[in-house]
Amino acid sequence: MITDKIDKINKIIMKKINSILIKGFHCANLILIIFYVYPGSIFGYVLYKNPSIQLQITRDFLISSNHFYVFIILSIIGILAYHNTKKINFLINYLFLLSIIIELFHILIPFRSFELRDLFGNFMGVIVVVIIYKIKIRYEKNS
């Protein structure tokens, strides 16, 4: 009887957390799109009054580290939000397509340019999270 109530409370809490994660993913997605299609750097404009200055979290090595970090964060939030749904495969495809489309838009946006290292940074951010997710799922199935 008490365990039934606890289970019911846990389900309500998990449903609320999942709802917050989904809303967080959509907000993060919107913010990412705004930052990526803005002509120049929003951070550079706010901090230095110069939109041509790009902030660099860490030095680049073969791929863009900033793009890598951003897509890791977006992918983690998305997978946490949708991991128990049938939409997970759609989400993974969406993240890959988003990384391509956003980078292609840089061809058209003033003060932006298409760079392969940015595209590879986007891809690697998604790939790292998806591989960890797939390993986790496989481990859970075998347990």
Image (cartoon, grey):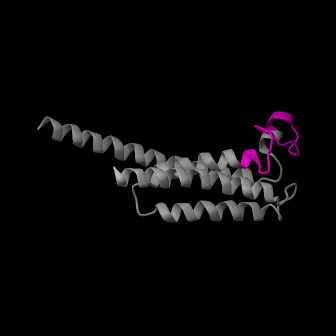
**Res. 44 in view:** yes
Q: Position of residue 119 (x, y in %)?
A: 74, 58
Q: Residue furthest front?
A: 142
Residue in view at x 30 percent, y 43 percent: 12
Disc tally is 0
- Among the 4 quarters of the image, the one containing residue 102: bottom right
Magenta stretch encompasses residue 62? yes
Residue 79 location, x and y as percent? Answer: 50, 52
Horizontally, residue 8 falls left or right of residue 71, namely left
Residue 37, can we see it?
A: no
Residue 118 or residue 111, whichever sits in front: 118
- Residue 1 is drawn in which quadrant? top left
| Residue 58 inside the magenta-drawn segment | yes
What residue is at 79 percent from the left and 50 percent from the top? 62
Q: Nearer the viewer, residue 131 or 83?
A: 131
Up the image or down, 109 lies above or below 64; here it is below
Secondary structure predominantly adopted by residues drawn in magenta: loop
Q: Nearer the viewer, residue 104 or 12?
A: 104
Q: Nearer the viewer, residue 96 or 46?
A: 96
Q: Give the image location of residue 59, x and y in percent.
A: 80, 40
Identify the residue at image location x=28%, y=40%.
10
Task: Give me the residue at 53% from left, 50% from top.
Answer: 132
Q: Position of residue 57 (x, y in %)?
A: 75, 37
- Span highlighted in magenta in the image: 45-67
